[in-house]
């Protein structure tokens, strides 16, 4: 039976959503932190569920179609390699840089989305056997997701969770990239992860 690996991006996003809900309801962030940490400790042990890689790939394609519905026809790099083109060497594929510039007009939001896109790109390229690097990138991804939740307010569109899902989908727009990110998630199987608690945004 194949294993279905849940995306740490989605899991982290759900945890940050819990934080924002608590903030709205004026709960103590310290108390909520206990609530958020519980799934992050347990999830690695239950992260594999019955399913198959083909199903997850189809879900990624569906998300890409959703992005196109909202943003228009995507002009994404489809090279047969993981890296794609990054002419300015900023750690983000040029086609994703263009997508960010076209779809997010506030500079602070652009920086937040670019921060997440950079960590996603690193997750594709990292040596999956180097667990220390894999865990470091996973932590930096959680920081980047936290930054998105800071920069995108709960009462505005697009929603932070939607931004996270969209950038994930366009980063993993080919099967080779999708499989690389799946391998990244598999490398984290059995590890204990915690979320960044502060200093989410690099810029």
Image (cartoon, helix red, strand yellow):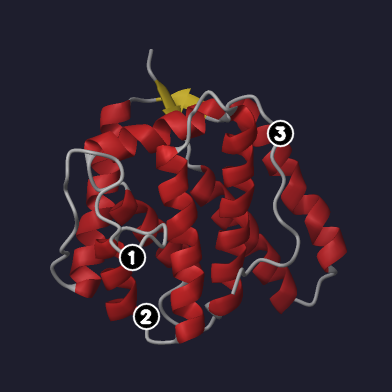
Inspect this view and state whether residue 60 appears: yes
Secondary structure of the residue carrying numbered label 1: loop
Of the numbered discs 1 and 3, the one sitting upstream in the chain is: 1
Position of residue 136 relative to residue 102, above or below, is above
Residue 5 pos. (x, y %): 46, 31
The residue wearing badge 2 is: 104
The residue wearing badge 3 is: 192
- Work out which quarter of the rendered image holds the N terminus and state it: top left
Of the numbered discs 3 and 2, the one sitting upstream in the chain is: 2
Residue at far bottom of view: 106
Q: Are marks 1 and 2 in contact (CB under 8 Å)?
A: no
| Picture residue at 40% right of the left edge, 40% below the top | 124
Q: Are marks 1 and 3 in contact (CB under 8 Å)?
A: no
The residue wearing badge 1 is: 88
Position of residue 26 relative to residue 199, above or below, is below
| Picture residue at 29% right of the left edge, 46% below the top | 60
Residue 112 pos. (x, y %): 51, 71
Secondary structure of the residue carrying numbered label 3: loop
Q: Counting other residues with Cα less than 10 Å from the Cα at mark 2, is it few (<14), some (14-19), or many (20 or more)?
A: some
Residue 176 pos. (x, y %): 26, 34
- Work out which quarter of the rendered image holds the C terminus and state it: bottom right
Q: 39 or 172: nearer the eye?
A: 172
Q: 84 or 178: nearer the eye?
A: 84
């Amino acid at each position: 039976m194949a294993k279905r690996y849940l995306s740490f991006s989605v899991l982290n996003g759900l945890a940050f959503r819990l934080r924002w809900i608590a903030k709205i309801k004026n709960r103590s962030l310290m108390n909520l932190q206990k609530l958020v940490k519980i799934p992050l400790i347990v999830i690695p042990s239950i992260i594999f569920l019955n399913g198959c890689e083909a199903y997850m790939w189809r879900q990624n394609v569906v998300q890409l179609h959703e992005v196109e519905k909202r943003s228009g026809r995507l002009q994404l790099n489809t090279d047969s390699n993981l890296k794609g083109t990054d002419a300015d060497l900023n750690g983000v594929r040029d086609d994703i840089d263009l997508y960010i510039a076209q779809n997010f007009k506030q500079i602070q939001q652009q920086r937040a989305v670019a921060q997440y896109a950079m960590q996603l790109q690193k997750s594709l390229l990292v040596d999956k056997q180097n667990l220390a690097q894999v865990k470091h990138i996973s932590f930096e991804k959680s920081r980047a997701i936290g930054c998105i939740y800071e920069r995108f307010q709960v009462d505005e569109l697009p929603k932070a969770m939607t931004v996270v899902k969209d950038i994930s989908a366009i980063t993993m727009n080919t099967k080779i990239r999708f499989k690389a990110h799946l391998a990244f998630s598999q490398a984290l199987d059995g590890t204990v992860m915690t979320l960044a608690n502060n200093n989410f945004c690099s810029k």
